[in-house]
Image (tube, coloured by chain):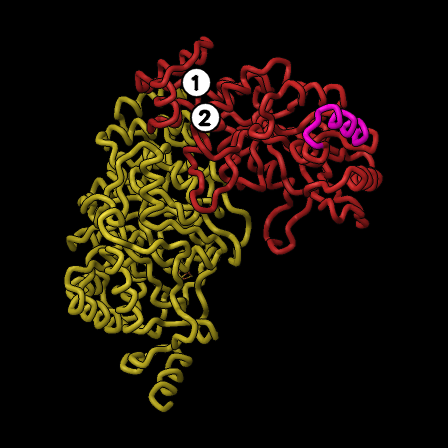
Amino acid sequence: MSVSSISDRVLAGTRLDRDEALELYLDCSTSQLGRLAGAVRARRHPAGLVTYIIDRNVNYTNVCIARCAFCAFYRPIGASDGYVLGFESIFQKIEETIAVGGVQLLLQGGHNPDLPLDWYEDLFVQIKTRYPDFKLHALSPPEILHLSRLSQQPVSVVVERLVAAGLDSVPGGGAEILVDSVRRRLNCESKATAEEWLSVMRQVHLSGLRSTATMMYGSVENPEDRVEHLCRLRELQDETGGFTAFITWSYQPPNTELSGVEATGIEYLRTLALSRIVLDNFDNLQASWVTQGGKVGQLSLAFGANDMGSVMIEENVVRAAGAEYCMDEAEIVRNIEDAGYVPKRRNMVYDILGDPLYRQQSIPRRTKLAVARRNGDAIAPVELSRYSARSQFGKQQRQAIDKP
Amino acid sequence: MEVFVPMDEALTRALQRIEQSVSLEEQDWEALTAGSDLISVGLAADEARRRHHGDRVTFVQVVEVPLDNAEASDPIPEQAGEVRLVGRPETVSQTIKAVKALADWAGVVPVTGFALEDLLDLCGNKSEKLERLLQQLRQAGLAMVSRVAFDALGKPEPILAALRAGGMDVASLCVDSPSGATFREALLEVASWKRVGTVFRSLAPLARMDPDLPSTGYGDLRRVALARLLVDNIGSIQVDWARHGSKLSQVALTFGADDVDAVSAVASSDQGWRRSPREEILRNIAAAGLTAIRRNGGFEEVADEG
Ligand code: SF4
């Protein structure tokens, strides 16, 4: 089929199959792809609103046994700069977030064998006791799977226990590319196969939670794999309707084992536009300004995105790979309005919470994103001694905390 | 392949008026600069660009040398297509001496340098003196003046005359005042100039960096697209790889730009993970669906060794 007739099908609202999507991705010009994505987005969001959320991206530990080849963030067990955040430190981050109008924590971390399920449960319960209205958007599918393996409990039980402790929704991290041959090459198949990632998400949705979905492109996969990834997400969304949004970002090579070069800005915009077209059952697509920078982040709005994502406040994972962009609420709003849209604050399920907050109350400008740990913070907080460790290093660390 | 997506009426009208060379009214400017339909403006600019340049994108790899340290001793970087003197000249003799020294060093690689307004300053704002200085610089080995700011030109005729008589071209006419209204006036003014395309080799429409109020992606691409649509007496619309970054510059190539300035001639040592600048620019131009053509500081195509 020609690009022109595939485009007609898109404009008529007809779903594309894998072959059609691939042909469009490979052969349609960038501007035309953007124009199609813009038309699809305008059909779904006719009011011209662009949303964003004020929340904080917190990474509770960087210790990880998964060792994904594309990850610059993780540290092996026993590394001198491996850390676990203390509960008090997390509470302080929440208070700082609430002070600037934040409504949730995006909480993710490494697969740390020395943090058992009850550590997470206690943390969530304490957060909810202190801040009952504050939301926990936490633990991507591979982290849930890791907890299932560590605790020897089925995923459904782990999810149930986390929900009982206060989990509100699940971020779509760890999807990378949902094709096992690609996952093998990225050394991330063992943390979760494509089917495992999807089945954890299915379980999450069945439990009544909503989640996001993601795609990290630009590492070792080919265009067919990207299309396959999108189609697999679309199929699960048909089944459960549990995804609120989709976010794609480019692999960030610096400081990773895999190395290589980052995909270009145009590849990002094309991939985003294709995602808008293929994911015809997703309402919301977020711009990834944290990987693309503010300018291409804003241009995402012309290529199918209807959401500027989060103000983040803090970021550690992309920064570990060398990219350091910052947009506070005022800057996000300026970019939305400059693009001809109306900015609105939202929560994780895309309820509109209101107009820009910084116009209603004084909020200090932020020109740099915060980091997980401040100088002098302990790398092993005292409460860790209450929880069992799996690794030899973790056991010794507990003993050292007990007997200072 | 044209995807038919209904366009905003006001924008359609504005783009039609540009195509028919009818002067734009206030509402046309509003449609071109404030709506959310950036892609349609970009598509029109891309078509205009393809009429002039097909799918060719030129780029130049530059090695910059500070004026106060023009006694370069290392071998010239292998990838350099231009040696550019940067800095504000203090005296005529220092300026000529620096050009001579660099021209000896650069060999066949063209030497460029200076902002024309600084040279004019050096000549006490006298265009006859400027003409003489330009001749001396040409004899010393200067292939081209690097840039001139639109704001500095005022009434351009005497300066244009000095450039022509001095046998000197300017690589980039920079319409880089940050204000939108001034940009619009500047574009219309430049578009009205006669016979300038052989003197000003490219138009650089992106704004100077303002750390307090950075320009936006939409704003930058609109400037590039409008420059392409409204100015047809200067052949090239230029973006600066170093100043505006690879991502924005690459996207600008699909919004009307056809020339990339300031690609480094040397790999940055603190970022050894990157590919060489040449590979990086070639990869970016190819990913934009365009064909890369290497040029030198004299705007001459440079054949690749294979
Ligand atoms: S991506 Fe996540 S799971 Fe993989 S190594 Fe990094 S922290 Fe661990």
Q: Tell me if I can see residue A164 in this picture.
A: yes
Q: Residue at x 31, y 29 (%)?
A: A16
Chain ID, mark 2: A
Residue A190, above or below A88: above
Ligand 1: image quarter: bottom left
Query: Residues in magenta?
Result: B124-138
Q: Quadrant of the C terminus of chain A?
A: bottom left
Chain in red in the render: B
State the image quarter where residue B246 is shown: top right
Q: Residue at x 73, y 39 (%)?
A: B83
Q: Tell me if I can see residue B246 in this picture.
A: no
Q: Identify which amino acid the numbered label 2 is placed on.
A: Ser
Residue picked out by circle 1: B1
Q: Which mark is residue B25?
A: none
Q: What colour denotes chain A?
A: yellow
Q: Position of residue B284 (x, y in %)?
A: 55, 37
Residue picked out by circle 2: A29
Who is closer to the viewer here, B147 or A379? Answer: B147
Q: Identify which amino acid the numbered label 1 is placed on.
A: Met
A398 magenta-colored: no
Q: Position of residue A369 (x, y in %)?
A: 39, 57
B127 magenta-colored: yes
- The reply to whether discs 1 and 2 touch (Cβ–Cβ < 8 Å) is yes
Who is closer to the viewer here, B136 or A246? Answer: B136
Q: Residues within 10 Å of mark 2 (few under 14, many from 20)?
A: some
